[in-house]
Amino acid sequence: MNNFLHTVALILLLVGITLTYFDNYYATLIFYLIGLIYILIGWDQVGGIVPNSKIFMFIGLLITTITFAGEFIVGLITQDTLMIYQETIEAYKNKS
């Protein structure tokens, strides 16, 4: 199962890098899924013999935290930008 999850994470990484150039919204979702997969890998190996199981979990937590916070900040910026556009359009209509 470990090799399968690592393979899926690698495929998702390649898809995420490709989507970064074409559609940023789906790319961040893919990176979030990669973080969740690494959390799953770390959780699966916690009781096992593998000494670096906590590293996978922390990497997954770091990836999910960064992508979640990044999407939250991008959403706030987009919301503020739309508000500025609406105010500008209303001011332009009132001016005419």
Image: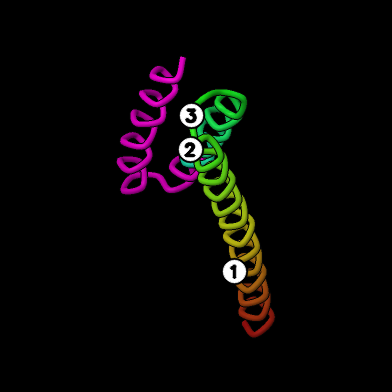
On residue 50, the disc is 3
Q: Are marks 1 and 2 in contact (CB under 8 Å)?
A: no
Q: CA distance from mark 1 to mark 3?
A: 48 Å
Q: Describe residue 23's horizontal placement relative to residue 66 as left or right.
A: left
Q: Nearer the viewer, mark 1 or mark 2?
A: 2
Front disc: 1 or 3: 3
Measured in 3D between alpha carbons, the distance from the residue under mark 2 to the one under mark 3, in whole angstroms, is 6 Å
Q: Identify the mark at residue 52; answer none if there is no mark.
A: 2
- Label 3 near label 2: C-beta < 8 Å? yes
Label 2 SS: loop
- The image shows residue 34, relative to residue 68, as above or below, that is above
In what element is the residue under mark 1? helix
Q: Amino acid at mark 2?
A: Asn
Does label 1 or label 3 sit earlier along the sequence?
3
Relative to 72, is 10 above or below?
above
> What residue appears at the point 36 percent right and 37 percent down from the top-left corner?
13
Q: Which residues are magenta?
A: 1-29
48 magenta-colored: no
Q: Is residue 41 left or right of residue 43?
A: left
* Nearest to the observer: residue 64 or residue 95: 64
Whether pointer 1 and pointer 3 mark residues with C-beta atoms closer than 8 Å, the reply is: no
Q: Name the residue tied to disc 1.
A: 81
x and y, in percent, of residue 80 in the image: 65, 69
Residue at (36% x, 47% y) in the render:
20
Where in the figure is residue 10, as x and y percent of width and height?
Answer: 35, 31
